[in-house]
Every structure is written in C-alpha cells, then in structure tokens.
Image (spheres, rainbow, N blue to C red):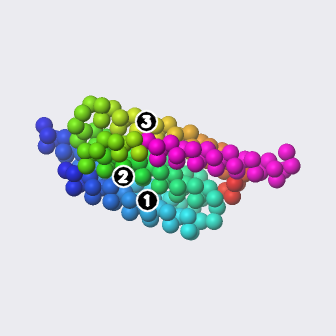
Amino acid sequence: MPSLLLGASVFVLLTVALGLFAILRRSADVDRLMAVQLLGTGGVAILLLLAVATETPPVMDVAVMLALFAAFAAVAFVRDASGASSEARGE
Amino acid sequence: MSLVMDILTICAVSAGALFFLAGTVGLLRFPDTLTRLHALTKVDNLGLGLIVLGLLPQTSSLLFAVKLVIVWLLVQLSGAVVTQLIAGAVRHHGADG
C-alpha cells in the first residue's frame, strides 16, 4: 500500500507541475493566482499522502501550514487588487 | 476486512488523483476566468476530499485520522472563501484585477 500512495503523490505532483504552465500561458494575474492555488491544494494532497505512506505524522503539520499560506496568498492578492484599483480611480 | 479497506483506499485515492488531473486540464483549457475557477474548486472539493477519504482507512491511530479530517476541513473552508474572494475581484475589476 505505501508504494501505491507514493505513486499517487508523484502523479499529483506531475499534474500540479502541468498546471503551473498556466502561469506561462496566461497574462492575467488572476489566472496565475489560480495556478498557485492549485499548487497549494496539490501540495497539501502530496504531503498527506506522504505522511500516511511513510507513517510520519509530523508531515501533516507542514500540510496545514501550506493550506494556510495558500489562503493568505489569495487574501493578500485580492486586497492588493482592490487597493490598486481604488487608487487608480482617485479614491 | 483489511482487503475491503485497501480496495476503498485504492478506489478513492485513484479517483482523487483523477480529479486533480481533470482540474489541471480545466485550468489550462477552459475559455474564461470564471470557468477556470470552477475547475479549481473541483480540485479543492473532490480531489482532496477523495484522497483524504482514501487515506483514512490506512491511518495507524484515531488522532492521525482526526487530524486528516481537520486538514481537509481547513482546505475546504479556505477554498470556499478564497474562491468567493477571487470571483468578487474578477467581477469588480475584470480579469486583469
């Protein structure tokens, strides 16, 4: 069973890496942020698979941190976007 | 019993990995920002949800299993909030904002 879980984590890693091509292909910042969100969720999935496959529960704490940072990144992005546009309107 | 658990793990983890692939393809191929956001939420909900469901029978202790569910709930909550925020930003400022 551990080898299947490790294989699944490699598969998820490859799909997430494929998703990062969106950063190269799209010009809009929102699309780039979405690729980073995919990396966040994929990273959590990879770390959880590794934690169970190698029976190292502390890896799960790293997954929690990654989930938090992905959420913070998105909130910071949205705050920045709304701040920039209200400056452009002279508010 | 352990065989049933192993089959559940194999099915759920494979389905979750498949949803990751589907979400990535959607992110790359869908025509506009909001449809791509829709593909991204499928990864958050179904992809990670199925992987956590598949991992639950393989955990060694109850604490470990509860922690898995807590991580999943955190991602679920933050995913829902972040998706609303991004969609709101796109609606107010256009896809460039």
Label 2 lies in what chain? A
What amino acid does circle 2 point to? Answer: Ile
Task: Tell me the element at label 3.
Answer: helix
Quote the CA–CA distance across marks 2 and 3: 16 Å
Identify the residue under disc 2: A46
Q: Residue at x 37, y 57 (%)?
A: A12
Crowd rating for badge 1 (residues with CA inside 10 Å; few <14, some 14–19, many 20+):
many
Labelled disc at residue B36: none
The Cα–Cα distance between marks 1 and 3, rounded to whole angstroms, is 21 Å
Does the segment drawn in magenta span residue B77?
no
Quarter holding the C terminus of chain B is bottom right
In the displayed structure, would residue A42 be above or below residue B79? Answer: below
Q: Name the residue type under label 3.
A: Leu
Discs 2 and 3 share one subunit: no
Residue B20 at what x, y percent from top left? 40, 54
Q: Would you name the residue on which mark 1 appears?
A: A16
Q: Is residue A73 left or right of residue A82?
A: left
Query: Range of the magenta residues?
Result: A63-91
For this view, does B56 lie left or right of residue B96? left
Q: Secondary structure at mark 1?
A: helix
A67, B33: nearer the viewer: A67
Which type of secondary structure does the marked residue at label 2 adopt?
Answer: helix
Callouts 1 and 3 close, C-beta under 8 Å: no
Q: Residue at coordinates 41% horizontally, 48% vertically from top-left?
A: A44
What is the chain letter for disc 1? Answer: A
Q: CA distance from mark 1 to mark 2?
A: 10 Å
Q: How packed is label 3: few (under 14 Cα within 10 Å), some, or many (20 or more)? A: some
Which residue is the extreme one toward the right?
A: A90
Q: Quadrant of residue A75?
A: top right
Whether residue B54 is visible: no
